Amino acid sequence: MRGVQRLVRDRPLAAVLATLIAALFVSMRMEIRGWPWEAVFFAQPVVVLLIWFLMARRNVPDLGFPPRGRPVTDLRSGAQRPRAFVAALLVSGALTAAAGALFLVTGATTPMGVWLPRAAFFGALGALVIGCLATALPEEVVYRGVLVRLSEHRWRPTAVMLASGGLFAAAHAPNLADHGGSALWVGLRFAELSLFGVALAWAALRTGALWIPLGWHMGSNFAGVFLELVWVPQTVALWPVALTTMAINLAVIPLVLILERLPRAGAIARGATPSG
């Protein structure tokens, strides 16, 4: 009861949670009726950002973009810089592309499309627009930006990660329903998305920045959407594909730990004392 009372008093966080839950129910209702539920997906980040700026009175750097020029005195700073975004983008994209190619070669997925030279250009363009700009960017701002930053000082880290991962996965329910897969496929996809969201929320909490979650999500989506648009792979071996995807999702953890340690030498050379 006290937790509910505290949540009600924290109006920005309560408003964000209410928005995400309401958006889920409305989008599912629209999907069932055959209406364009995607409109809710595009409206949701606008409402959440209005809450962030107007009600919470926070700014863009507070979402997880530490200002440039900050002294390198924090051990985490190697994972707080834009270069961490690039590293996460490349590693995630490479792992997702390699896994997708492996699935096609081994027969875990069956290609329904045919490779054409022009398909590569339009596939890459579609992956950039659909996978990165229209999907990964708003999702990270909402679920690992606003939601994590508003709740990190009020909830335990485990609760923050589970809420971020669970709501993120739930938001994909209309899309999963649209595909019309089996109950096992839907369950495995939900587990993949939940783990993906939890891992990225951990990265956001650990680093205090959004660079790695954003880069990882964009890299994963770019490679995944590219394969979807060019080859249209249909999953045949559900469990191998799901478990491999989950393993790739967890690879963000060692990347964070590696990037955290990159500035140590530079900080010591300048006479700084890294924390941790």
Image (cartoon, helix red, strand yellow):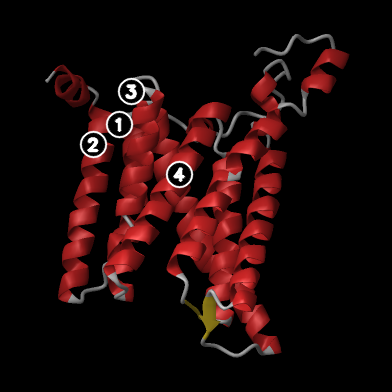
Q: Earlier in the sequence, mark 2 or mark 1?
A: 2
**Residue marked by disc 1:** 55
Q: Which mark is residue 141?
A: 4
Q: Earlier in the sequence, mark 3 or mark 4?
A: 4
**Residue marked by disc 2:** 15
Residue type, label 3: Trp
Picture coordinates of residue 119, whole percent (x, y): 63, 85
10 Å crowding of disc 3: few (<14), some (14-19), many (20+): few
Instruction: Report the Cα–Cα distance between label 3 and label 4.
Output: 19 Å
Q: Is residue 229 above or below residue 89?
A: below
> Which numbered disc, 1 or 4, marks the residue closer to the eye?
4
Residue type, label 4: Val
Question: Can see residue 114?
Answer: yes
Residue type, label 2: Ala
Instruction: Report the Cα–Cα distance between label 2 and label 3.
Output: 16 Å
10 Å crowding of disc 2: few (<14), some (14-19), many (20+): some
Instruction: Report the Cα–Cα distance between label 1 and label 3.
Output: 20 Å
155 with respect to 268 (left or right): left
Q: Earlier in the sequence, mark 1 or mark 3?
A: 1
Q: Is residue 2 above or below residue 222?
A: above
Q: Earlier in the sequence, mark 1 or mark 4?
A: 1
Q: Are marks 2 and 1 in contact (CB under 8 Å)?
A: yes
**Residue marked by disc 3:** 155
Picture coordinates of residue 51, whole percent (x, y): 31, 37
Picture coordinates of residue 44, whole percent (x, y): 31, 52
127 with respect to 183 (left or right): right
Q: Are marks 1 and 4 in contact (CB under 8 Å)?
A: no
Name the residue furthest right. Answer: 269
Q: Which mark is residue 113?
A: none
Picture coordinates of residue 180, whole percent (x, y): 29, 75
